[in-house]
Image (cartoon, grey):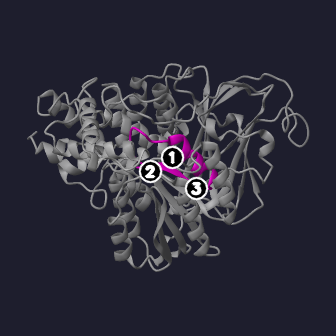
Amino acid sequence: MKKNNKKTVWIIKSVSILTVLSMVSGCSAGGGDSSGAACTTAAAVTEAAAEGELPYDYDGGAVQESIAEDWKGEAEDAPAAEEDWDDSVNRVMTDEMRETEAAPAARGNGGMARKYQAAYGEEGFNTEEYRYIEENGYKNVADSPLSTFSVDVDTASYGNVRRMLCSGISIPADAVRIEEMINYFDYDYPEPAGEEPFSVTTEYSDCPWNEENRLLMIGLQAKEIDFDDRPFSNLVFLLDVSGSMYSDDKLPLVQKAFTMLAENLDKRDRVSIVTYAGYESVVLDGVSGENKAKIVGALQDLEAGGSTAGEAGIQKAYELAEKNFIPGGNNRVILATDGDLNVGISSESGLIRLIKEKKKSGIHLSVLGVGTGNIKDNKMEALADNGDGNYNYLDSLYEAKKVLVDEMGGTLITVAKDVKIQVEFNPEYVAGYRLVGYENRLLRNEDFNNDRVDAGEIGAGHTVTALYEIIPGGAGGQTLKYQTGPKPSGSTELLTVSLRYKAPNGDKSRLMEHPVEADSYREDMSENLMFASAVAEFGMVLRDSENRGSATLESVMELAESCVHADSDDYRKEFLELVQLAAR
């Protein structure tokens, strides 16, 4: 591998090894073959480091201290306000990083260069925040025959975990949301029939990480839409341009990502742009999607600096969305940020109350997280969950293309909202169960029939997958459906999957029921269940879950290798590479 100019190649600050792929091979997520060879390239970088072709031992902490002293010594250049101090130091430090011949050291398990050491030092100025996850335990069917949760099509956790793995940094357990990792991928479920917005598929087989238990998969497939016949869209790009967004993996990535989205809009769409730093600013107001040059030009002119008045930006974005509201259309605010709000309402609880009030206007909120070192994942997840939208994490242009171009329908067009799932287990066949993931999406059983209780949304073409680890064997006890009535004790049903959902602009839910027979068990797993199991195992290993059973990285690879083929999609191939990287 030839050495490249260190200043332009090895000062790697984007949040994904996929950016390295684009620099080394010329591959661009904006066009051409953006295959998932992420960790193949990571291996090449690792090999280069082992051969001494990467510069080593860059002391980011010392550089930061030196720059801070320089700031203090130059009165005319000093930050005007104390709250701008960290942003100013960060900006100059970034310039210093661009000029230096040194780069982050490649350390730890022979892994990828630790790109962010330069920005945060050896000890780390890491202020990333994640909501605590109390992992689901086993429930006794005799005591708890019902399990109720909201669907989740967020995928942010997978992109964030990929960023950490490819950067060689440790992964906080609470950053691993297993349902988001599973739902990052598409599964081969049948298309819905008739007027239903999604189909329901179940599969019942053995549990790979616990040979005494079995595994139930519930899969939903939302209907596809002809994007040429999509509803008119009223989009507000709400962009964080504060000082914390200065680095290349933040605002510059956001500018490129939204440029790709803008290039796929047309005269049916209205675009507004609101930015916020120390204050909010309206950059565009209801411009036709046909005027791509104006939208792209406005995006390219953005610069980062100042504090983070996120509340003011949110208020202004909803104001514009309401002003340009399209009845029956897709009215949506798309927020791109690292979540590091520090002016106005900035607490998670305060933001939730704000968004719950704003969503009454019929405007959805989607969130795109970016960056490293200071991301507030807990706030961004809360905003999307309570704003009737989805939450994705952009670690590269490759991911931006996936979310905003390839899956544009699912990201922007809702086909069903407030989607809830309730599973009732038959104690004649099931002694206990455990829902894998969805800890942040659990609902009270009585919430299932309460249309005032918010739940998740499903976008066009989305798949949703949930796994239950099941302890077989009758336990007796009090039941509901399976005790008396039309389905008396002695039923051959293993369980019933019930779903409630509302139309995108509706207020009253509809009910679907899907019984699963006890004899539906099959020893041989489909590739859908096999791959979902591999991803779930991977998440449990990364979390060091007490419920991981026999799961190891080796068993994850064995499962994945058995269902990832030459004709598999690039994302599944990339998953296998990530597991291999984690095992090094």
Q: Is residue 152 left or right of residue 96?
A: right
Q: Residues within 10 Å of mark 1 (few under 14, many from 20)?
A: some
User: Between 43 and 112, which is closer to the camera in this rendering?
Assistant: 112
Q: What secondary structure is found at the residue carrying circle 3?
A: loop
What amino acid type should be assigned to the residue bearing mark 1? Asn
Q: Are marks 2 and 3 in contact (CB under 8 Å)?
A: no
Q: Tell me if mark 2 has few (under 14), some (14-19) or many (20+) residues whose alpha carbon lies within 10 angstroms of its own.
A: many
What residue does disc 2 label? 307
Is 20 above or below relative to 108?
below
Indicate whether 82 appears above or below 135: below
Q: Is residue 581 above or below residue 511?
A: above
Residue drawn at x 48%, y 59% is 279
* C-alpha distance separating marks 3 and 1: 23 Å
Question: What's the residue type where badge 3 is placed?
Answer: Gly
The answer to which image quadrant residue 258 occupies is: bottom left
Q: How many marks?
A: 3
Of the image marks 2 and 1, the number of the one nearer the N terminus: 2
Q: Residue at x 59, y 49 (%)?
A: 345
Q: Residue at x 59, y 35 (%)?
A: 437
Query: In this figure, which residue is indicated by the disc labeled 3?
Result: 389
Q: Which label belongs to residue 491?
A: none
Is 571 situated above or below 523?
below
Decide if residue 298 is on the left or right side of residue 431: left
Residue range in magenta is 370-394
Q: Which residue is mark 1?
A: 342
Instruction: Determine the secondary structure under disc 1.
Output: loop
Furthest-right residue in view? Answer: 485
**Alpha-carbon distance for marks 2 and 3?**
26 Å
**Mark closest to the chain's N terminus, 2 or 3:** 2
Q: Position of 490 compared to 359: left or right?
A: right
